[in-house]
Image (spheres, rainbow, N blue to C red):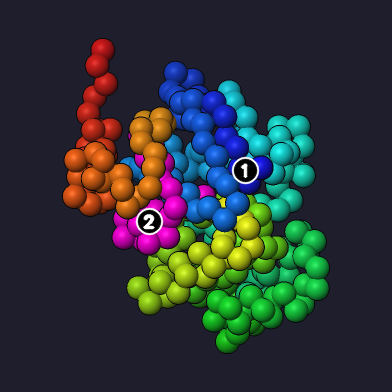
Amino acid sequence: MPVLSVTGLSKRYGSVEAVRDVTFAVEPREIVGLLGPNGAGKTTTINMVLGVLEPSVGSVVIEGADLATHRAQALARTNFAAVYSSLPGNLTVYQNLRVFGLIYAVRNLRARIEESLSEFDLLRFRDVKCGVLSSGEQTRVALAKAMLNRPHLLLLDEPTASLDPSMAKDIRKRIRAFADNGGSGVLWTSHNMYEVEEVCDRVLFISKGRILLEGDPRKLPGENGAKTLEELFIALARESLAPEPT
C-alpha cells in the first residue's frame, strides 16, 4: 500500500486553478521530490495533503485512510516542516517538542525528546526560547518536531534552505536513513537540484499546477535533452513563464 495516494487533485480560487488534476503516489521507503518554480502549485498541493486546504476536486489517501472522511486517522502518522512555518517563539525548544509530542501522543515522550535533541544537535538550546534562535537553529527544531512521532508520511517544504552546507548534508543523510530504516515515505520540495539528485528516488516537475514530468532525477535530464537536472529545471521554469496560447 502506498504511504500517500493523490488522485485527480485540483484547487480553484474563482477562475484561477492553482492545482490541476494532480495524481501521484509515495511508496514506503521512497523520497519523492516535488519540483517547480515559485507559484507552480507545490505548497498548495502539500497544504491539501495536510488537510489545511480542502481540494476543489480529487482525493488524498494516507495509508488507506481517505483524508476527507477519516481525517484523524489519515493525519495521525503524518508530520511536516517548512521554513515558513515557525514554531511558537515564546516557548523553549523543550517546551515546543513536549507540546507537539503530547498532540501526537508520542509514547515515552521524555526519552523521545532527549533523543531528538541529541540527534539534531539541540541539547544546548533545550531551555532557549525558539524566537531568539537563528534561522538555521529554528529549522533544526522544526525538523526535530517533524520527526518526533516517527511519521509514516513526512512532508518537507524546503527543509534545508536556511542551513549551512555541512548541516544540510547531515540532515539529508538523516532523512534518507529515516525513510530507509523506518519504511516511511517522504514528499520533499526543494530548489536545490544537487540536493534533489542526492536524496530523491523520484521527482515530479510541476508547472502551472500540472505535473509535466516524472522520473528518476539522475536519468530525466538525459531523457529530455538536458545535461543536468538544474538545466532541465530552468528550461521547464522558463516554459512555465511563457503565456498560454489563447
**Residue 81, horizontal then vertical, whole percent:** 55, 58
- The amino acid pointed to by label 2 is Val
- How far is mark 2 from mark 1, CA to CA? 21 Å
Query: Taking the image as drawn, is residue 11 in sight?
Result: no
Q: Residues within 10 Å of mark 2 (few under 14, many from 20)?
A: many
Q: In the drawing, what numbered circle is on residue 196?
A: 2
Please give the range of residues in magenta.
Answer: 187-207
Q: Quadrant of residue 62?
A: top right
Q: Residues within 10 Å of mark 1 (few under 14, many from 20)?
A: some
Q: In the drawing, what numbered circle is on residue 2?
A: 1
**Residue 48, horizontal then vertical, whole percent:** 58, 38
Q: Earlier along the polypeptide chain: callout 2 or callout 1?
A: 1
Q: Residue at x 25, y 46 (%)?
A: 221
In this rendering, position of residue 60 left or right of residue 71: left
Q: Residue at x 67, y 66 (%)?
A: 148
> Helix, strand, or loop for circle 1?
loop
**Residue 51, horizontal then vertical, whole percent:** 64, 40
> Helix, strand, or loop for circle 2?
helix
In this rendering, position of residue 17 left or right of residue 144: left
